[in-house]
Amino acid sequence: MNIAYVCTEKLPSPAIKGGAIQVMIDGIAPFIARSHKLTIFSVADPLLPSEETVENIHYIRFPKMTYEADVARALAANRFDVVHVFNRPAPLASYQTAAPHSAFVLSLHNDMFSPLKITPTEAERALMACTRLTAVSEYIKRTVTGRYPVDPQKINVIYSGVDLDQYVPVWTEEGARIRQSLREEHGLVDKKVILFIGRLSKTKGPHVLIHSLPSLLTRHPEAVLVITGGKWFSDNSRNEYIDWLHQLAAPLGDHVIFTNYIPHFHIPKLLLMADVFVCSSQWHEPLARVHYEAMAAGIPVVTTNRGGNAEIVRHGQTGIVIDDYTNKQAFAEAISYMLEQKEHAERMAKTARKLVETHFQFKHVASRLEAVYAEALASHKSQTSSL
């Protein structure tokens, strides 16, 4: 098949500035390009050329201001069998008009059918324009099916994944060596490290973790909260919320460390220095990909029952899921449990790693998408031949 990927206008591909969608595309593209011709349309970036071919993947990048129009023209000028549009339903109808010969697949990574993001008319046009839809979680699937009459056969849940070759489990000899080296480097050798990775925003909830720390320290005075992330992916500038986080953390001294944004390719090793990874999401998280990453590294996971998080983190089996997500004491108790009940924590971590090995590698994601592309193309050909 001749396949086109249409990335969002937010971040470039490859993922030189991070982004969950961009990281996923980086992971699946090599597998897709082995058997198919693949072109990736992406927003331009000063660090990347406007066009290049790397390892059999053709990248074309357009300015942000004219991105949608440029993509539509490129789709019209080429004959792609399948066009996979990532997380942007609004322009899909115009893309389909530009390339009526192509089958369109729309993947949803957020609640993009919210009335705050798309009008009912635009949504209905998008749903008519695409042949198949995918969602990163059952939760995201429901945000569509709960609002619009979508044929269940038309939408598939395809979870994300990781490149497992990048993740050395913490219990291996190499994992232990990396862990020790990082903890020595950061002065954390004798500490119990609680790790947060994500954007520093109220919806991600790092403030709740800081609030939970005084209680945690009464039981684990050697605990240190490491907060990794910036205002927006590679953006380490400060805003009012981040200033407030630093104010909250100040009385706790060395028990809170801010690392700022760390490029995604360093995350597999960074995770190894943690005793517990915590996702403190306060919003309906689609399903944060950092869960897959922590599970791949073999780090015990604590998360919130928000959005799709609990679909892969099963309480008591592959991690701890907090229902009372605004309650600082609930976090302190969950983290303490992981630190104190080490055998159960390790058992959950190993079960989680096995789940990633068997279901959540990029090769699995690519294979599932290939099946969707084949179905979409066959369905599109059937529809057009009957006209």
Image (tube, rainbow, N blue to C red):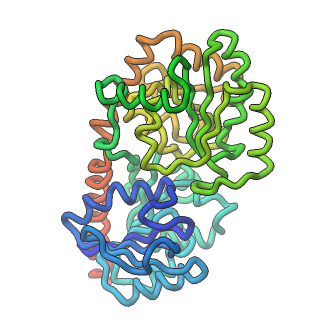
Decide: is 17 above or below 121.
above
Residue 7 in picture, x, y percent from top left: 46, 68
Q: Quadrant of the C terminus?
A: bottom left
Q: As drawn, is 197 to the left or to the right of 16?
A: right
Instruction: Residue at 55%, 70% (x, y): give it.
Output: 9
Quadrant housing residue 33? bottom left
Residue 215 in picture, x, y percent from top left: 71, 16
Instruction: Residue at 62%, 72% (x, y): give it.
Output: 121
Decide: is 93 above or below 84.
below
Pick whichever, 129 or 287, lies toward us: 287
Quadrant housing residue 245? top right
Residue 34 in picture, x, y percent from top left: 20, 63
Q: As drawn, is 320 to the left or to the right of 116?
A: left
Q: Is residue 109 visible?
A: yes
Count of numbered labels shown in the rendering: 0
Q: Quadrant of the N terminus?
A: bottom left
Q: Is residue 103 visible?
A: no
Residue 347 in picture, x, y percent from top left: 37, 17
Decide: is 55 above or below 309.
below
Decide: is 89 above or below 183.
below
Q: As drawn, is 252 to the left or to the right of 284?
A: right
